[in-house]
Amino acid sequence: MGVAIASCVPGAVQQALQGNGWPIVLGGVAGLLPDTLDFRINRHFATHDVDIIPDPLKPDPAIIALGISWAVERCAAMRRSVRVRLRAIRLASDRWQSYLIRFDPAKRKVIAEYGPVVDPGGNPVWNEAAVPCKTRLRADAKVRVDVKVEYEAELTVAGFDGALLSLEPVADGRVAVGFLPWHRKWSHSLFFAVSVGLFSWLVGGGIAGVAAALACAAHALTDHAGFMGSNLFFPFTFRRAEGFKLLHSSDFFPNVAAVWISWAVIFLNLGVYSQPRPFATGMAYCRALIAGGVAPVVFLGYFLKRIKQNSTARKRRSRPNDSKGMEQIRSKTIHQS
């Protein structure tokens, strides 16, 4: 997306055709920079207060659920933030035992459930559905305070350094549960975008600075359309604000649509400044963008929606009438005294 945004800056494509590619290059780098900083650097400096390390030889989800419940109540009692590190369960050099954490604010419960064994890519090594339900391990732990889930109510821990939860006390007495507290903070702010633009201006000139600033800001604003949100107004604020909740960052269709439209914009902008021009500017440009960028995306969205509807209908027809299998799930409820 960064290159597409940079190609929209007047003069950026012209300079690239004349041999100065700094505006396009710096725009592309700036578009990738926020997530690169977070996942390659910031995550390794994240600290924690509570460390939950499941035993790979004695699988017990009760320990996990009880540990999270204790951390939530400690956060509410002390009225300060608490960070919980959930360690991954390593079985072999390339095998991990996954487990799922689910929060149920309505019932004041935190649920821990063991899932399938996965490889480093997160792909199941064996199919959980093929294993009898009675072998699945699950535990519930009561929480004596109200919980507010800021992102998603479920978190899967599988592989490498595990996951990090942030627990923050809220003014109304609840405890806010956040995921990836090191992500989308200062690196996803408008202040950072302006800083990147100023640095790019020193390196490649004014057009490069504008292109880099817009590309970095577009990344932060696009991420804010999701559920996790971002800290757009750092350094005036130091916490992530909730996003617009329009989509998830892992959704297939929005990612494909963004890539396709970005390629269409780049292609059209290159055509605008080429000699001879393949089409005129103005309405002709808009028609070409709709025909080559928007229309295929709309068709793909409709096609995927139909596939999802047909798949859901088939699952409903094949679903058994009774739910005896679900009753075989081994479950524990832990009530803290």
Image: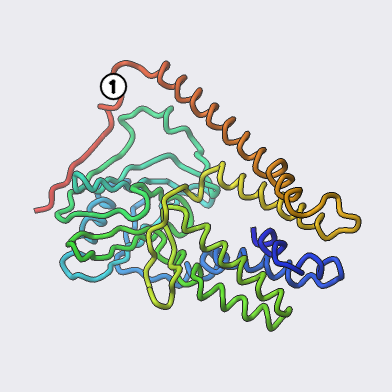
Check the image and tell me how it is coloured: rainbow
User: Residue 285 or 86: which is nearer the viewer?
Assistant: 285
User: Residue 71 or 211: which is nearer the viewer?
Assistant: 211
Q: Is residue 171 left or right of residue 227?
A: left
Q: Quadrant of the N terminus?
A: bottom right
Q: Residue furthest front?
A: 283
How many residues crowd around disc 1 within 10 Å: few (fewer than 14), some, or many (20 or more)? few
Tally of marks = 1
Question: Residue 181 sits in which quadrant?
Answer: bottom left
Q: Residue furthest bottom?
A: 202
Q: Residue furthest right?
A: 276
Q: Is residue 119 above or below residue 307?
A: below
Q: Position of residue 234 (x, y in %)?
A: 43, 74
Q: Is residue 190 left or right of residue 112?
A: right
Q: Is residue 110 left or right of residue 311?
A: left
Question: Residue 240 sits in which quadrant?
Answer: bottom left
Q: Secondary structure at mark 1?
A: loop
Q: Position of residue 191 (x, y in %)?
A: 51, 75
Q: Residue at x 46, y 64 (%)?
A: 183
User: Residue 103 or 310: which is nearer the viewer?
Assistant: 310
Q: Position of residue 196 (x, y in %)?
A: 60, 76
User: Residue 268 or 122: which is nearer the viewer?
Assistant: 268
Q: Position of residue 144 (x, y in %)?
A: 14, 54
Question: Residue 216 sits in which quadrant?
Answer: bottom right
**Mark 1 lies on residue:** 323
